[in-house]
Image: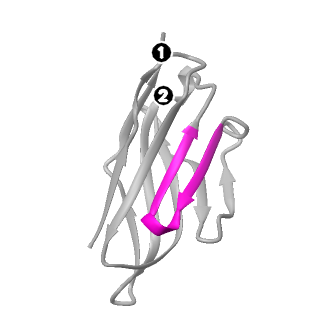
């Protein structure tokens, strides 16, 4: 009922930048929070950044000052601008969306993930 399409991952050198995008579509009435999580190989999935419908943001300490999350409510799309990338940022990045369906039921949806590799 809700589809998330992520894009923008890839291979980048340390110190480089990438921008991830996540577009939500389907039987969505409203979205109150979207965010990015990541999972490195052999590690647990962790929160990177979230943004609410009122554009309130939160970040993991490890990315503060380097990553910026933003949102286009007209397109149900969020972005993650990642600067000064480090090898430790290497992971699969997942988009998560929470909201309400047109049936009035709450939903939580995850994207398929996009690989970010930081290496020289």
Residue bearing mark 2: 90
The answer to which of marks 1 and 2 sits earlier in the sequence is: 2
In magenta, the rendered stretch is 67-81
Asked which secondary structure carries label 2, the reply is: loop
Mark 1–mark 2 CB contact (< 8 Å): yes
The answer to whether 51 is drawn above or below residue 112 in the figure is: below
Query: Which x, y percent locates residue 120?
Result: 48, 9
Cα–Cα span, label 1 and label 2:
8 Å
Residue behind mark 1: 119
Counting from the top left corner in percent of width and height, residue 98 is at 47, 70
Q: Is residue 18 magenta?
A: no
Q: Residues within 10 Å of mark 2 (few under 14, many from 20)?
A: many
Residue at point 56%, 17% (across, down): 14
Horizontal and vertical percent for residue 52?
A: 60, 67
Identity of the residue drawn at 46% across and 42% down: 20
Q: Please, which residue is most extreme toward the front here?
A: 74
On screen, residue 96 above or below 93 = below
Neighbourhood count class around disc 1 (C-alpha, 10 Å): few under 14, some 14–19, many 20 upward: some
Q: Residue at 65%, 71% (x, y): give it.
A: 54
Q: As drawn, which residue projects farthest toward the top?
A: 120
68 inside magenta stretch? yes
In the rendered image, residue 59, in percent from the top left (x then y), is placed at 67, 49
Q: Is residue 29 visible?
A: yes
| Colour scheme in use | one colour
């Amino acid at each position: 009922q809700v589809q998330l399409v992520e894009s923008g991952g890839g291979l980048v050198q340390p110190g480089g930048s990438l921008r991830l995008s996540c577009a939500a579509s389907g039987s969505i009435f409203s979205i109150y929070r979207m965010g990015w999580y990541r999972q490195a190989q052999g590690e647990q999935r962790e929160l990177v950044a979230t943004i609410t419908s009122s554009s309130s943001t939160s970040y993991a300490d490890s990315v503060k000052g380097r990553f910026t999350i933003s949102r286009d409510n007209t397109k149900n799309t969020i972005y993650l601008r990642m600067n000064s990338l480090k090898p430790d940022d290497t992971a699969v990045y997942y988009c998560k969306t929470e909201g309400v369906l047109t049936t009035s039921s709450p939903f939580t949806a995850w994207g398929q993930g996009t690989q970010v590799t930081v290496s020289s």
